Amino acid sequence: MLAGSAVVLAGCATTGRPVLLSAAPSETWAELEPVAIVETGTDALTIGVRSRGCAAKADFVFRVDRRGSHAVVAFARRRLETCKGPVGQASLRFGYEELGLQPGEAVVIANPLTPSA
């Protein structure tokens, strides 16, 4: 499933939150870590990833590319989990300032969106 195909407009430019857009096929990368959720808050973007209980933000890196009028954000796992707990989901919060996103900016997530991630 393409990362942006199920992403619905989830922000509002007037609140300062980035606006999530559906991704074009050239903006998604099936090789990236699947994400189950993408949420925009007042000051951060939160992604939900598959975890056995020990996934942490420090285990992930991100890249932001600018394409015309929007930013394309990709998240990648840099360390594999070594714990053996039951499969669940971890929520990882990345601040807009940390990501280099501007208030109200249009954003595409390059990761595949998989609700069961």
Image: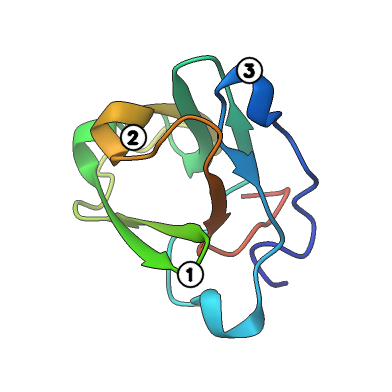
Mark sitting earlier along the chain (1/2): 2
Residue at 64%, 40% (x, y): give it: 19
Q: Residues within 10 Å of mark 3 (few under 14, many from 20)?
A: few
**Which type of secondary structure does the marked residue at label 1 adopt?**
loop
Question: Label 3 belongs to which residue?
Answer: 15
For the N terminus, give its image quadrant. bottom right
Mark sitting earlier along the chain (3/2): 3
Corner quadrant of residue 71: bottom left
Question: Label 1 belongs to which residue?
Answer: 68
Above or below residue 105? Residue 73 is below
On the picture, is 84 further left or further right than 106?
A: left
How far apart are the two marked residues, 3 and 2, measured between alpha carbons?
30 Å
Above or below residue 46? Residue 84 is below
Instruction: Identify the amino acid type marked 1.
Output: Gly
Instruction: Identify the amino acid type marked 3.
Output: Thr
Q: Position of residue 111 (x, y in %)?
A: 51, 62
How far apart are the two marked residues, 1 and 3, measured between alpha carbons?
22 Å
On the picture, is 88 further left or further right than 68?
A: right
Corner quadrant of residue 43: top left
Task: Name the disc covering residue 100, or none.
Answer: none
The answer to whether marks 3 and 2 mark residues whose Cβ atoms lie closer than 8 Å is: no
Residue at 51%, 37% (x, y): give it: 47
Q: Position of residue 82 (x, y in %)?
A: 24, 43
**Front disc: 1 or 2:** 1
Q: Position of residue 80 (x, y in %)?
A: 25, 52
**Which type of secondary structure does the marked residue at label 3 adopt?**
helix
Of the pair 82 and 19, the residue shown nearer to us = 19
Q: Residues within 10 Å of mark 1 (few under 14, many from 20)?
A: few
Task: Name the disc covering residue 55, or none.
Answer: 2
How far apart are the two marked residues, 1 and 2, measured between alpha carbons?
33 Å
The answer to whether marks 1 and 3 mark residues whose Cβ atoms lie closer than 8 Å is: no
Residue at 29%, 28% (x, y): give it: 97
